[in-house]
Image (tube, rainbow, N blue to C red):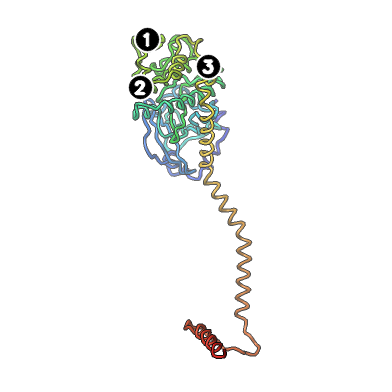
Amino acid sequence: MDDEMATSSTNVVAHSPIYNPNIGVPYFEQCYTIERKLGQGSFGEAYAVYCKEDGRRYAVKRALDAFRSSADRTLKLREVQKHELLPKHINLVQFYKAWEEKYAQFHIISSCEYWIHNFSGRLYILTELCERSLLDYCTELHTIPEREIWNIFIDLLRAVDHLHKNDLLHVDIKPENVFLTKDKVCKLGDFGLIFDLKNDTTYTPEEGDAKYLAPEVLNASPTKAADVFSIGITILEVTTDIDLPSRGDTWHQIRSGHIPDRFFKGVSKDLTRLIKWLMSPDPASRPTTAQALSDAAIACRTPIRSVYLTYHQMMVTVTEHTGSVLLWLVALVHLLAIPFLMFFDALRRKKNDVCTTPYKGTVYFTAHTPEVNGSIRHKRMSRWGDDDSDS
């Protein structure tokens, strides 16, 4: 399988204006500049980087350790292949490419541009850069205005609804994996555990975060209803700033539908109702993402949010293409200006030729340099004086 992918687009690196395979410096170090560290987990570290190839900023996730074996490499590459499955959506963190490298030697293994050196290489995944995670945002503010919570709720439902329509489950929805742009657009990210309902047959529940897992996932394969539960408990945490347990009696109490009313103090009835609906103990009683989006409390807020998201996407597109557009405009203006410049240059040359041609006729006037001495005013006054004397 890897050999088949290796032959699909082996010329991408050759087209890089930056990368030089002959100097012994890894592709990442040649083509990207680390600006700041975004975070670190048990398997990898994330950085905000500047790309020297296109002048844009991205997030890159780099594995902490090299592949330990061929089996480990195959397992880790599944994450990349799952990224490739993702259908593009404004509320999903966009995946661009991934590669594995050791020193400066690697080759491409797919049309999505991820590159392999050997079993001991390190995996890099390049994605869209967001401002911060929802976890960081909540930690900083503690109390999130309900108006913003509704926007986060709608964006998260839209993201998961898009995945579910393509028979994909996220399985690991939590504030740490939800990201906010500088314009407060909410995006679901970190698709390492994504479950393909059409092709995946096995699931290991230990890989998910127990704080946000639906109770039925511990005993069975994940379902769309399990993702819906994770949305509900994520919004519960954002709304109430509750400290969610990962085990114990309180864990079971929350999943039995017994959430004390004191946690919803100051929360609107509609938001409280929706959170409890999404967290229903019985998976069959939970709404689908489409049903939740159709609820009156959400549907009345969706049009305004949709307009804002459309505006945001338009601005992102304009920003991404600003450099190219400016270059085209400069080239167009230059192209249009050439005939005018040639015309005026021809006029100037003709004028210079006329002025420098010797005059061969009779000279009636001698050269004279005017002086600002009031002589004209004097003559005018004299003329008025002569007229007065004649009268």
Residue 158: which numbered mark, if any? none
Q: Residue at x 52, y 35 (%)?
A: 313
Amino acid type shown at disc 3:
Thr
Residue 262, given in percent of the width and then of the height, sits at 35, 15
Residue 7, given in percent of the width and then of the height, sits at 57, 32
Say if 258 sits above or below 384 in the image.
above
Pick whichever of labels 3 and 1 is earlier in the sequence.
Answer: 1
Is disc 2 placed on a helix, strand or loop? loop
Pick whichever of labels 1 and 2 is earlier in the sequence.
Answer: 2
Nearer to the camera, 51 or 107: 51
Residue hosting label 3: 288
Nearer to the camera, 156 or 111: 156
Q: How many marks?
A: 3
* Residue ranking furthest to the front: 391
Q: Left or right of 194: which side holds 143?
A: left
Q: CA distance from mark 3 to mark 2?
A: 25 Å
Residue hosting label 2: 241
Can the viewer see residue 101?
no
> Where is residue 50, by image quadrant?
top left
Residue hosting label 1: 253
Q: Are marks 3 and 1 in contact (CB under 8 Å)?
A: no
Residue 240, given in percent of the width and then of the height, sits at 37, 20
Q: Residue at x 47, y 15 (%)?
A: 278
Q: CA distance from mark 1 to mark 2?
A: 17 Å
Q: Quadrant of the C terminus?
A: bottom right
Amino acid type shown at disc 1:
Gln
Q: Are marks 1 and 2 in contact (CB under 8 Å)?
A: no
Q: Residues within 10 Å of mark 2 (few under 14, many from 20)?
A: some
Say if 204 sits above or below 142 in the image.
above
